[in-house]
Image (cartoon, rainbow, N blue to C red):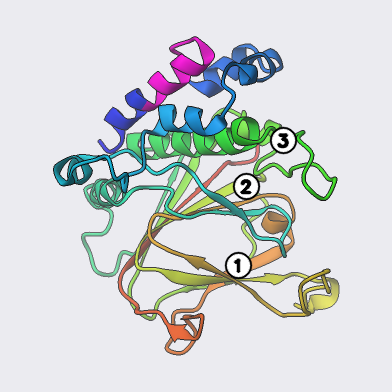
Amino acid sequence: MFGIAREKTRFEGFSMYFGSKESPHELLKAKPKSVCKQSLVKMENHEELLREVFGESSDSEDLDPQTKHHQTRDPIPSWEQIKEINGLWLCRGFLSPQHQSSLVSAVLNEGWFKEDSHNQAMRFGDLPAWAIELSSSIRDAVFLEDHVSEPINSVTSNGGTKPCILPSNLLWREPLFDQLIVNVYHPGEGICAHVDLMRFEDGIGILSLESSCVMHFTRVEEGGSDIVEHHENHPLTTKVPVLLTAGSLVIMSREARYLWKHEINRKPGFQMWEGQELMQERRISITLRKLCQVD
């Protein structure tokens, strides 16, 4: 299964940092208020922690070609906040090429897409082992950005506080996700603009595999007008494009989850980025959500 060796190595880094063999979310569940505050002073440079947890970058000059070829650790998470949309975050290169390949194999080995007419699979409750591991990796990556790289209560350069990717009540819920959708898109196939059903909680993750694409976000306004309000430093626009490369992860919460529709139009002429049309090949998307609790 993909990532098993990586997870062991990753938690060795957390062990050195927190003084425990438990994963970071297990530690925070046990000591949610004290762990981060007491432990963050143990390492002056957070980049040193990230190297301990995720290993050196695969393009390190110190590695010989054979070591680089066999290295399977994922890159250190690099998050980008989509400024126009509150609650929309993008993590490019969330999975290394090796782990992307392993994950694609795991998905296809489920046997869901043996028939050409089958292009979607949904699972509820007990998810496959690879999906549970993927959920754990998402939680770890969000945790590192929100609580380790720059604590969420830190002050930014403009005097405000650093926004978090996921609020704590979402990040530490159990399970983080319990519903899975896998879609296989062939060239020309996409998905219409929509907001995910209200039967799912806030906090949704979308992982892209194989072919790159541009996902467009359109604000849902009262009265049915899909016009984005004017934002400072952003011109009036009807759509916000986001480039999803192979191995990238999107997290939607708050306004991004409830007040913005998202779509992928893969018809000729619509998949444009920086003036160039993207080459369309097979694309696999993995969407993870949490069902609302029924009283």
In the picture of the structure, the residue carrying the numbered disc 1 is 262
Considering depth in this image, is 96 or 280 the residue closer to the camera?
Answer: 96
Question: Is residue 167 depicted above or below 112 in this figure?
Answer: above
Q: Is residue 263 visible?
A: yes
Query: Residue most toward the front?
Result: 62
Q: Quadrant of residue 6?
A: top left
Please provide the residue range marked out in magenta: 10-22
The amino acid type, in three-letter code, at marker 3 is Ile
Task: Sort mark 1 into few (<14), some (14-19) or many (20+) by Cα contacts within 10 Å.
Answer: many
In the picture of the structure, the residue carrying the numbered disc 3 is 152
Q: Earlier in the sequence, mark 1 or mark 2?
A: 2
**Labelled pair 1, 3 in contact (Cβ < 8 Å):** no
Considering depth in this image, is 53 or 26 the residue closer to the camera?
Answer: 53
Q: Which label sits on residue 290?
A: none
Is-magenta flag for residue 19?
yes
**143 displayed left or right of 211:** right
Tell me the mark number nearer the camera, choosing from 2 and 3: 3
On-image quarter of the N terminus: top left
Q: What residue is drawn where x is 64% and y is 48%?
A: 199
Tell me the mark number nearer the camera, choosing from 1 and 3: 3
Helix, strand or loop under label 1: strand
Q: Earlier in the sequence, mark 2 or mark 3?
A: 3
Task: Sort mark 3 into few (<14), some (14-19) or many (20+) by Cα contacts within 10 Å.
Answer: some
In the picture of the structure, the residue carrying the numbered disc 2 is 200
The amino acid type, in three-letter code, at marker 1 is His
The answer for how far apart the CA atoms under marks 1 and 2 are is: 16 Å
